[in-house]
Amino acid sequence: MADPASIKAALTALAEHLSTRRNAILHAWQRSVEQDPELSTSSSLSRSQFNDHIPQVLDAFERRLAAQDPVEKEVAFEEQKISAAEHGLHRWQQGYYQRETIREWGHLHYRVLNELEDYGSVYPELQAQVMPIARRALVRLCGEGVCESAASYERLQRTEASSRVRELESALHQLQDLGRQRAETWREAAHDLRGTVGVISNASTILALEAKHDPSRANTSRLLERSVDSLRALLSDLIDLGRLEAGEEERRIAPFDAAAILREYCESVRPVAAQRDLFLKAEGPQTLQVEGDAVKVRRIAQNLILNAIGVTDRGGVRVLWEERDAPGAKQWLLCVQDTGPGFQQQSAAAPLEDALRKATEEGHQADASESAPAPMLTSQSAPAACASHGEGIGLSIVKRLCELLNASLELETAAGAGTTFRVVFPRAYQ
């Protein structure tokens, strides 16, 4: 039967031997790492940087081999774990990938194992239990080293990821604040200009009264009045858009009859179309009960319908509303179709038209293989663009309102063939 005292003495002698061979072990370890084609980071490190906490790890391993009682072994084991964790931390700071660190632990394991095998061959008279005990201790050393290094990497990655998220959130908040400040400045400037336009409007009214009996001055006065009215409407749109972009608008969800609101608005604006010798058709079910923000839905319809009337010289505008059930969602549709010239290829509205058309075409192409209704371009995908004669501001307002109401937008247009806008709203909100 093996003598415990002699086994302990043999393990102590082995620990002392490993201590005397420390530099040789570290040198052989570094050389094997340098020869590994998958490890390159170590080449930029000095000798002391490369060794890092491994000498302390080997110290703890040797004390564990020579320990006389379980308490000493456990203390040495804890010191070994702490040094291994510190090694993982420093390897992270030196730019190592986790895989590189684990491969280095493998090379260290192999080099220490070589020392144990060489020692066993030199002292064949060692009791049979000595070398298995040393090998098991070595396996535990390298296993714990890999685990602690990996744990250090995981903690550091989580910390770095959290830091990056905080930085991104901070940058996003700053961008949002800048956007709100820009929109607020824009809105305030438009508001100030609208006050100035009011003064000009009053002056034009006085001029119109004075020019009542002078035909040439009367024509000029009417032109001035129309220009002032147009400018006032444009500034109102700018203020609305500035308020939307500044995040000052909130949606107020409640049940309402979309058909009643749209029919009433079409009736109110029909004289405007008639003045231009245009028809305005309102088509849809008598009632269409939905949830949403009735005021903002009316604003979307207003911008689309007035824009359609404004760009149409012959024919007219057709306004359609209907239910539209998509897979997994209940929706309703607002469609505004004009017989105007369509968006011209070189118009200032080209960015908006191109983005809407591209997304619409892609939706139809993807849909052809599934035989389902064409997916709409979400308003978040459409860029805010300004068309000529101020019509782009109205469309930008529509875009922002669609974003606020989780609605989607689709455009179909061609030069000389008119334009169709479709807005798809959810029938209910969570």
Image (cartoon, helix red, strand yellow):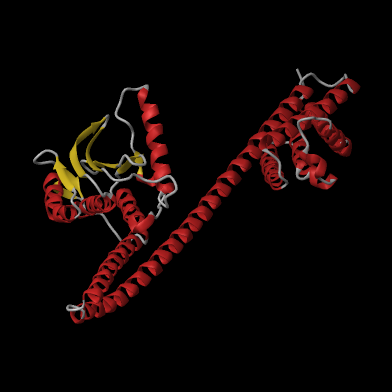
Residue at 87%, 25% (x, y): give it: 119
Task: Please state the horizontal and vertical placement of residue 134, each as a whole percent of the image.
Answer: 76, 27
Extreme residue toward the left, this view? 286
Residue at 45%, 48% (x, y): give it: 346
- Answer left or right for 52 relative to 420: right
Looking at the picture, tell me which residue is in the foreground, 189 or 144. Answer: 189
Q: Is residue 394 visible?
A: yes
- Answer left or right for 226 relative to 109: left
Q: How many marks on residues?
A: 0
For residue 153, what is the image quadrant?
Answer: top right
- Answer left or right for 21 relative to 164: right
Give above or below for 203 relative to 311: below
Give above or below for 336 relative to 173: above
Image quadrant holding the C terminus, namely top left
Extreme residue toward the right, this view? 122
Give above or below for 96 relative to 236: above
Residue at 17%, 79% (x, y): give it: 213
Looking at the picture, tell me which residue is in the foreground, 344 or 294. Answer: 344
Give above or below for 39 relative to 318: above
Image quadrant holding the N terminus, namely top right
Q: Is residue 70 visible?
A: no
Task: Please state the horizontal and vertical placement of residue 336, each as a whole percent of the image.
Answer: 24, 44
- Answer left or right for 219 relative to 358: left
Task: Please state the horizontal and vertical placement of residue 237, each as a whole percent of the image.
Answer: 30, 62
Task: Please state the horizontal and vertical placement of residue 392, each as a whole percent of the image.
Answer: 36, 54
